[in-house]
Image (cartoon, rainbow, N blue to C red):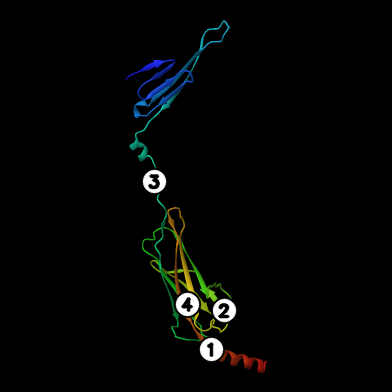
Amino acid sequence: MNVDQSDGVMVTSDLTVCQSNATVTFDPLTTSYSRVYVCVADYNVSGADLPNLSTTASTTVTVQSKSESHSNITSFTPPSTVPRPDAMITADPIMDRYTVGLLVTLDCVVTLSSAVDTPHTLTPVWRREGAVLSSNEQLIVGEFMSTSDNVYTSSLEFQPLTNDLIGNDTLFECEATVMPEDNTFVTGTTARSSINITVEGEGLYMSVRNYLYTLYIRFF
């Protein structure tokens, strides 16, 4: 190791120690400099009959190689997405055209991928021509219920069909959102299915109901 020392500065090929400002400069820093470093300062009080004083401070420097530093870095993996389920709407009964007064149920059948193996929630949203539906006197909107392994069904029940709710070629949509309870590493996904329903005329149910209502008014 070649050493030059002058004016309180000691210089090696990659280390500079300056006494005037009490610094040590490493250029470049290598693993060989991993050790305890001690700084000792000697001083006296000018004009005072006191012995020389000194103070000491130390620190430990640990230098890792590049390969060690890289091995300590925690990699970040972006969250994956829950596989999109299959969704399909079926009608009961199945008809090309429905008549007013029928009791009709639309079933939204969702099949989850077998890869969905973490706790999750499955939420349905039913829409009519884009507007969200909720349960009322005419409709019953059901939550998803498990019918078999990875298969869930949400029902939309008409109590019964009416002209003000369904007209010609009315669009109904089911939106199923799968959301993991812990979405740190897995995010949710949504599947959709739609069906068009046409209602016309006055069915037997409404005819009988109106007839009975007329009898009631007449005799009571």
Give the amino acid at mark 1. Tyr
Cα distance in 3D space between marks 4 and 2: 14 Å
Give the amino acid at mark 4. Leu
- Inspect this view and state whether residue 142 appears: no
Depth check, front residue: 178 or 18: 18
Give the amino acid at mark 2. Gln
Query: Dot 4: few (<14), some (14–19), or many (≥20) neighbours within 10 Å?
Result: many
Residue 83: mark: none
Residue 199 is situated, as x and y percent measured from the top left of the image, at 51, 85
Residue 114 found in image quarter = bottom left
Say above or below: 66 vs 15: below
Query: Which residue lies under the disc numbered 4?
Result: 106
Instruction: Classify the position of the N terminus by image quarter.
Output: top left
Query: Which residue lies under the disc numbered 3?
Result: 75
- Which residue is pictured at 48% across the width and 74% down the height? 173
Residue 65 is situated, as x and y percent measured from the top left of the image, at 34, 34
- Inspect this view and state whether residue 169 appears: yes
Query: Which residue lies under the disc numbered 1?
Result: 205
Query: Dot 1: few (<14), some (14–19), or many (≥20) neighbours within 10 Å?
Result: some
Say above or below: 125 vs 119: below
Residue 138: mark: 2
Cα distance in 3D space between marks 2 and 3: 54 Å
Tell whether 139 sits left or right of 176.
right
Depth check, front residue: 73 or 152: 73
Cα distance in 3D space between marks 3 and 4: 47 Å
